[in-house]
Amino acid sequence: MTKDAVTISSLQAELEKVRLDNEKLTYVFEASKIGVWEWDINSNSLTWDKQMYKLYGIKEEDFSGAYDDWIERVHPLDKIKVEKNLILSLKSKKEFHNQFRIIWPEGTVKVISAKGKVLFDEQKIPTRMIGLNLDITKDRERESTLNSLNDGLSKSLIKIANSEEKIKLALASAKIGMWDYNMENNICSRSLTLNLIFGYSELTPQWKSDFFIPDVIPEDIDNVKKYINEGYLKGSFNFTCRIKRVDDNSIRWITVAGLSYTNSKFQVYKVIGTINDITELHETNAIIEMNRTLEEKNRELNEFAYVASHDLQEPLNTISSFSGLLLKKYSDKLDEDGKRYLKYLKSSSTRSRNLIRDIIDYNRMGYGKKLSRIDCNLLLKNIILDLDSKIKKRNAHVEIKKLPIIMGYETELKILMQNLVINAIKYHDPSRQPKIVVSAQEADDKWQFEIRDNGIGIEEKYYDKIFALFRRLHTIEAYEGTGIGLSQCKKAAEMHKGTVWVDSTVGVGSTFYFTISKKLYE
Amino acid sequence: MLDNNKKPFLMNVMLIDDDIPTNEYNKILSTDFDLAQEIITHTNAAEALKELSLIESEYDFPQLILVDINMPGMDGHEFVTQVKEMEGFHENRTEIVSLTSSKPMNYLEKDNINSVEFLYFKPLTEDILYSILRDCFNM
């Protein structure tokens, strides 16, 4: 045991005696209105004697014994100072000595003089603090000739302080730091939240007339000085700047708002303010802004693609139409080669045209989409009408089971169903009559649609690949097409928070499924 | 049904497209299709409008007007709006059909196409002519 430890343990023993059963001392304390307290640092709890409750104007059952329950009773304007001094004595191992105001529950302000001694364990780590509280309100009152004035003032101050306290609580939970600077005594106090924002350890550095300006990054310093100086003249300021945190050197964005008070000589004597770390918000805003730019660029690109392909279509239409006309009307004047060349011309221009049309459609999908109520029975009826000539040409039999009324994007849903029906007709097996069945099933949170055919079928290894853009399984000669149709289906299903997939047996037929979520919102 | 009809389907039709080959092709197609007894073409919407304004009897007003939307000067939208304000125009007698190469980007914003009741995509084909007869004339 070290010498210090011996001393302390004997002191501990002494105090133990005092606290347990020393009637005389208790009597003295009572008569002198001295309260005895003990702070267990590990559990952060306080043990008070009876006099302490009287000093704080409360009953024993009104005090939880928690450290916070005590510090909340200290006058808001003294709180930082008291906690600062407590921490100082814990660090310096020196005696705690402080005077501060407390507020009784009904609002009376009392001035307390407090002393305390730190007790350590064997590793010299502070474990407890014991001490005294004495009400010196009366002494203080006598000290000043302005007391009578002060009393009225302090009562209204309490009201202000109480609401100020609530504001402070709100600010602390919103991670907003507060500070005030008194020019008369050059003291600047700040809330603990500011230490977190600036990365300060405990109480250093002290802020003076330039507040946090030393922590502002060089690029912003001139502006900050300008804003604050202008603020002094105007009476308020509000600006955003960047600071460099002391602990990890990270750059943070803060907003600073403040008010300055002027005396009768129009001199600023006090400045109060708040500081809010908005780095996350700032970063989010930057991302939102970038996203907006990206969307804008994307839209421009889409429009460019649209205009370019629109203008490409016109001449292609003419080539396609007139080569068709030549074939139809002048076939007898052309030899076989001439006819074949014309056919190439016609089929190529038609293919280019279709490709452009499909690219435009694919690009435009979802553009200006509007959620609406769709009767799928009606939708499919119209699709069948549009495909009338194709259906008749193949002598296809299309059966539509009862379909639901759903919320969806009509244009895209039509493309989705239409493409699947077109495919079912297109990839028919020439050896039998094409039969197509469209049906739907309800699940908890979605609708599942099914388009079943008895066509040529698809090998399993292509089940996923067929949905990729421009992916085709057959030559143009075998089956015409641009390779965009099923990509459109995929895009349309995804717009409805659903998926599209296929199940098939080669030589028997394919069944395409897609789902539409019931939970679509604008 | 339609195919066995020997007579032209309609009395008179007006075709408007600023592109000369397209306009000519549309006329050939309509003629071969036997769309109407009289087929008038214009490559300029303002001229077409002027001709329409000179028609005295409402029965001489075209039963069907096919108009391209995207034209320099007076475009299809403006043309349709003006035709509908003419004295000779009767909704029961005349159908106006718009043609376009591709849907405008803001196709779904109805305000932009509120003057267009029937919209078909170019190039004009026999299938489209059948659709027009079905949709507009219940044939």
Image: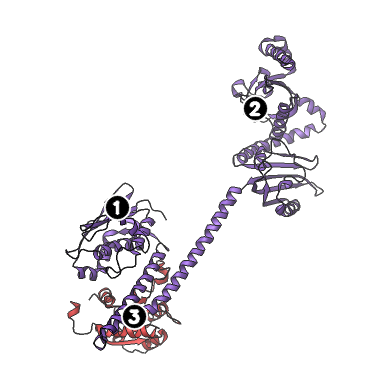
Chain colours: A purple, B red
Q: Is residue A197 left or right of residue A394?
A: right
Residue farthest toward the front in the current orientation of the protein = A337
Q: Dot 2 corresponds to which residue?
A: A70
Between disc 1 and disc 3, the foreground one is 1
Q: CA distance from mark 1 to mark 3?
A: 41 Å
Q: Position of residue A186 (x, y in %)?
A: 79, 41
Q: Label 2 is found on which chain of the structure? A: A
Q: How far apart, in angstroms, are the residues tagged by discs 2 and 1?
A: 64 Å
Select label 3 or label 2 by which is in front. 3
- Asked if residue A135 is positioned above or below residue A298 in the image, the reply reads above
Residue A243 position within the rendered picture, expressed as x and y whole percent measured from the top left: 68, 48
Tag shown at residue A448: 1
Kindly identify which chain the residue marked by label 3 belongs to. Answer: B
- Residue kind at label 1, given as amino acid type: Gln
Parent chain of label 1: A
- Residue B66's disc is 3
Residue at image position (29%, 63%) is A418
